[in-house]
Image (cartoon, helix red, strand yellow):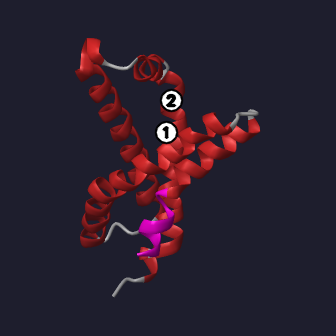
Amino acid sequence: MAGFVVAPMMPALILAGVVLAAGGDAQTLGYAAFAGYISYPFALLIGLPSYLVMRRRRWDGLRAYLLLGLALGALFVALFAGVAGFEGDAADSAWLNLLANLAFLLPFVLVCAVASTLAFWLIVRPDLRRP
């Protein structure tokens, strides 16, 4: 349970650190809270089933989890791009600006996703629960 509570916080913490290091203000720091708001449902809807599949297949090594983190990060960016593109002309300009900067966004999201899966793996340590 602790893994599902702590790991989704990682993107928000990383984003807050980047914003503070770049001299961002309180309004910009609100994006970090938004990252947390997005990461918890994503962890529940995508991360939990992924964990259950990995546990069932006994893919419990660190490398498997890091690869899963990369895959989930890429999936998140694809879903984000699809949602922003689906709205078309009704899309908010902020979303369209983020979509235009997808080349910058992708590495950041991948780092956050890998950090989340690493935190989850370190807390849960599925490799130590082998029967």
Residue 21 relative to residue 121: left or right = right
- The residue nearer to you, when weighing 6 against 123, is 6
- In the image: residue 47, left or right of residue 122: left
Residue at 27 percent across and 27 percent down: it is 82
x and y percent of residue 50 in the render? 29, 59
Judge whether residue 99 is colored magenta. Answer: no
User: Residue visible at 66% across and 39% down?
Assistant: 26
Q: Is residue 81 left or right of residue 101?
A: left
Residue with the mark numbered 1? 109
Q: Are marks 2 and 1 in contact (CB under 8 Å)?
A: yes
Q: Secondary structure at mark 2?
A: helix
100 is higher (above) or lower (below) than 65: above
Q: Position of residue 90 (x, y in %)?
A: 28, 16
Q: Main secondary structure of the magenta part?
A: helix
**As rendered, which of 51 and 29 lies closer to the eye?**
29
* Secondary structure state at the residue bearing disc 1: helix
Front residue (pair 79, 70)? 79
Could you tell me the amino acid type at mark 2?
Leu
At x 32% / y 19%, what residue is drawn? 91
Vertical placement of 53 versus 93: above or below?
below
Q: Which residues are magenta?
A: 1-8
Residue 57 spot, x, y in % from top left? 25, 68
Quadrant that contains the C terminus: bottom left
Q: Which mark is residue 122?
A: none
In the picture shown, does residue 116 fall above or below 83?
below
The 10 Å Cα crowd at callout 1, few under 14, some 14 to 19, many 20 or more, is: many
Q: Amino acid at mark 1?
A: Val
The quarter in which the N terminus is drawn is bottom left
Label for residue 105?
2
